[in-house]
Image (spheres, helix red, strand yellow):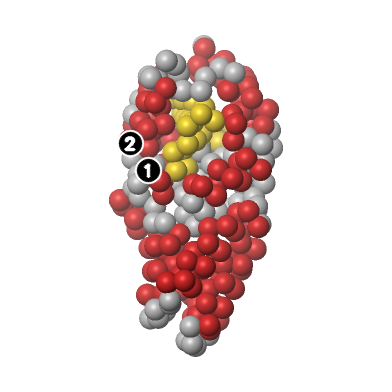
Amino acid sequence: MHSTVITIDFWQTLFDDSGGPQRNEERQAALRQAIANAGYFRDIEEIDTAFRSIWEYFDHHWLNHHRTPTSREMVGEICQRLDLELPEEAVEQVTQTFAQGVLSNPPSLLPGVPAALEFLANRAPLALISDTAFSPGRVLRELMEQKGIASYFSNFIFSDESGVAKPHPDAFHRAVEPFGGDLGNSLHIGDIERTDIRGAKGVGMKAILYRGNHIPHKYADDGTASAADAVITHWDQMPEIWERIMRG
């Protein structure tokens, strides 16, 4: 039984989004090939528009229903937007390419992550809470193993597996409760005010907003005042912040 549990976000907190353009080009190439193989003609601009517009569908479900569509669901939605029906085998192949992109064109760990995880894991159990998109939890686990950080974590909550996404309270409960943890004594670290910080504070946890990722993305924190207990711009700050908000 551990009173304190530390939960951590994945994207733009542990990993940056480098390799994103290459991943998306690989995904679109697989989609174009599958469409051509099935005997359809859609020009590149049509396919690109359908691919980019899928994020409207994703955001609708994520922001309004606190769930994240799976990669297979989004491939199906792209096909609907292009008014075509691919064979099941082709859908599966495209879905696998979408899912595996983070392994063929991996993002980078943000500076200071391994040392900070070692510091934190020596103080409380660590749980990951990740809202997934094209890359499912099983693939993100594999990436974490390749980068040497999976062993620091004792629990993994991926939205494609749990069916709930931050800021839904269940995402945090499922991360903390297996340890017998007390939400009021636990800590969440993440980069998005709406999902990470408000979600954690909503269940009574302490929260740290991470602002150390410098690759722009559409969900990025806008730099305004945060409800977090602390804000960090580099993982090297973690020991000092831990002492201040968890022991001070």
Give x and y (percent) for residue 97. 56, 63
- Above or below 31: residue 229: above
Residue pictured at 57% horizontal, 57% vertical: 100
SS type, badge 2: helix
Q: Secondary structure at mark 1?
A: helix
To which residue does mark 1 refer?
162
Up/down of 122 relative to 199, above or below: above
Q: Position of residue 223 (x, y in %)?
A: 53, 42
Frontmost residue, 86 versus 193: 86
Which amino acid type is marked by label 2?
A: Asp
Return the x and y of residue 165 as percentages of the image width and height.
Answer: 38, 44
Q: Are marks 2 and 1 in contact (CB under 8 Å)?
A: yes
Residue 232 vs residue 47, the one in the foreground: 47
Tag 2 residue: 170
Q: Which mark is residue 88?
A: none
Residue at far top of view: 248
Q: Residue at x 37, y 33 (%)?
A: 174
Q: Residues within 10 Å of mark 1 (few under 14, many from 20)?
A: some
Residue type pointed to by label 1: Ser
